[in-house]
Amino acid sequence: MPNRSDTEVITPALLRDWALPVPSGGKESRGTVLVVGGSRFTPGAVLLAGVAALRAGAGVLQLAAAESTAAALSIQVPEALVVGLPETSDGAVSGQPGDRLADLVAEADVVTVGPGLSEIEETRRLLHLVLDAAGPQTPVVLDAYALGALSHEPDLLVGSGRPVVLTPNLTEARHLLGREPGEDLDAEAAELADRYAAVVSLYGHVASPDGRSWREESGDAGLGTSGSGDVRAGLLAGLLSRGAEPAQAACWAAYAHAVSGQRLVPQYGRIGFLARELLDEIPHTIATV
């Protein structure tokens, strides 16, 4: 377990030395991101994650969400292919949605699972479907209810060699750890990375299963707003889609998320800005590192 002193601080200088890939060519060179989530009552989570992926550089966006929300999402995000998934009587995405989702997963370059999902058992079935359909080297970002599902099957990723990034908040970290997180979030992120064989981004604390760790120190209270985590998960997916490796994408996403919030402070103050207002700041934040 790394000591806090072993954890690198994420700075513009560190990121400049770890430059993001700059794909050339058309949109296909920047990859396809598929976001799977969005129950009947929380379709906005998929919207936030998807648009964040585009803002971070993804070339093609696909959204798979509860069938009752698909038409509205396709109007709100005209840049995306939107696919409606079967839902339960309570409006949750069904864990047995058929071949269409499996085909989309198989063809995607990055898959994000979790934003806006509900019902843990349905999410567990959905997570298995995604992991079974995805290529063995297709990066997967797990967020929100997908992390709760993973906590019920802690060995699901171990030994798979699959590139995975987990993006828990403190509540989700508690489920993954099986206890309350301590104050040293560097250590908690490292424990999760080791336990689940995945890169972990716990707020601004990033850890890789190979023992490396980083910390973003400029995040502020304003990021603690509804939908902010969905933006962070989508941002990560977009960076993976353009060719970043998981730990690199997690560090860049932690920085871009935090600094995009800082850029809103002069207009809105330290708290009070909305998660959707982070989206327009992302490209400039990344470009000016």
Image (cartoon, rainbow, N blue to C red):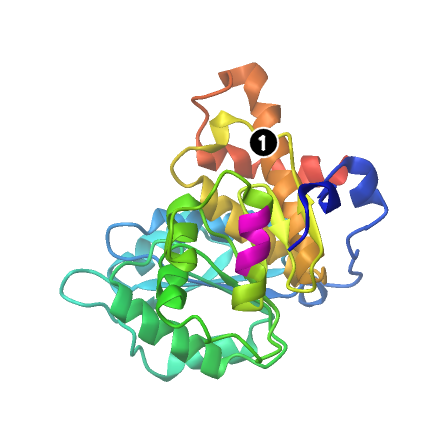
Does residue 148 appear left or right of residue 259 in this picture?
left
**Residue at the right extreme of this rendering:** 17
Residue sitting nearer the eye, 73 or 286? 286
The residue range painted magenta reads 187-192
What residue appears at the point 56 percent right and 19 percent down from the top-left corner?
265
Residue at 46% x, 40% y: name it: 228
The one of 200 and 239 positioned closer to us in this rendering: 200
Tally of numbered discs: 1
Q: Taking the image as drawn, is residue 285 in sight?
A: yes
Taking the view exactly as shown, the residue that stands out farthest to the left is: 89
Residue 239 covered by magenta stretch: no
Q: Amino acid at mark 1?
A: Gly
Q: Is residue 151 above or below residue 233?
A: below
The correct choice, above or below, for 120 with respect to 104 in the image is: above
- Residue 137 appears left or right of 112: right
Residue 3's x, y, as percent? 68, 46
- Categorize mark 1 by other alpha carbons within 10 Å: few (<14), some (14-19), many (20+): some
Q: Which residue is mark 1?
A: 219
In terms of depth relative to the viewer, which is nearer, 229 or 40? 229
The location of residue 246, given as percent across then percent down, is 66, 61
Q: What is the magenta segment's predominant secondary structure?
A: helix
**Is residue 201 something that shows in the picture?**
no
